[in-house]
Image (spheres, rainbow, N blue to C red):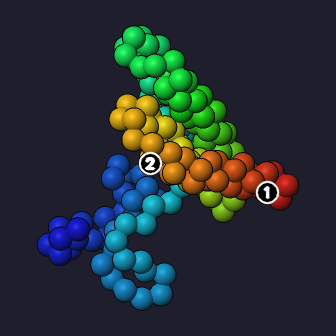
Amino acid sequence: MNHQLRHALADMTAFDGHGAILILDRRSGAGRGHGIVTEMTPRLALTLAAALLFAGVAAGAFGAHALKARLAPDVLGIWQTAVQYQMWHGLGLLAAGLLLLHKPDSVALAAAGWLFVAGIALFSGSLYALALTGVRGLGAVTPIGGAAFLGGWAAMAWAAWRW
């Protein structure tokens, strides 16, 4: 971010005026970060879940209709795997958001939410890209996303245990 823009946005507490979604602060000192710090709130988790689930339905329909005649069956299977994992973990993010409504200070639930988002981006994103481009190297990213999914479920279990 360039220096002038950073100062123009300094001390802005949120994109939408409801707080805790985006914090930019140019001041240094105890408790002050540099750049963008994003907190997982129930509102953010639920919004991201809805958007990712919407995108998952759209990706599924796109694969079933537009890509069916263009991709080999094994590659279409890769696409379908990406859609399925996006949908399941979008629901996991939705659950994390609903639980955050009851336990907004739960670090484990917030971590689960971010891990589900990261997992969808890395796991499903790499599989979508692999299916569309055929670049096999993209498959190397997929296990990182899978590990994020596992971490998300472990964090969710930890949050439930500590409830």
Report whether residue 125 is seen: no
Vertical placement of residue 37 versus 67, above or below: below
Q: Which residue does the numbered mark 2 point to in the structure image?
A: 137
Q: Residue 9: percent from the left, percent from the top?
A: 24, 66
Q: Residue 22: percent from the left, percent from the top?
A: 39, 59
Most foreground residue, 37 or 56: 56
Kindly identify the residue that appears in the image at 33 percent across and 83 percent down: 27
In the image, 56: left or right of 27? right
Kindly identify the residue that appears in the image at 45 percent across and 42 percent down: 136
Vertical placement of residue 52 versus 137, above or below: above
In the image, 127: left or right of 42? left
**Disc assigned to residue 158:** 1
Q: Amino acid at mark 2?
A: Gly
Report whether residue 39 is seen: yes
Q: Amino acid at mark 1?
A: Trp
Whether pointer 1 and pointer 2 mark residues with C-beta atoms closer than 8 Å, the reply is no
Most foreground residue, 7 or 65: 65
Name the image quarter holding the N terminus: bottom left
Kindly identify the residue that appears in the image at 68 percent across and 55 percent down: 151
Q: Report the label total.
A: 2
Mark 1 Cα-neighbour bin, 10 Å: few <14, some 14–19, many ≥20: some
Q: Residue 55: percent from the left, percent from the top?
A: 44, 29
Kindly identify the residue that appears in the image at 57 percent across and 54 percent down: 144
Mark 2 Cα-neighbour bin, 10 Å: few <14, some 14–19, many ≥20: few
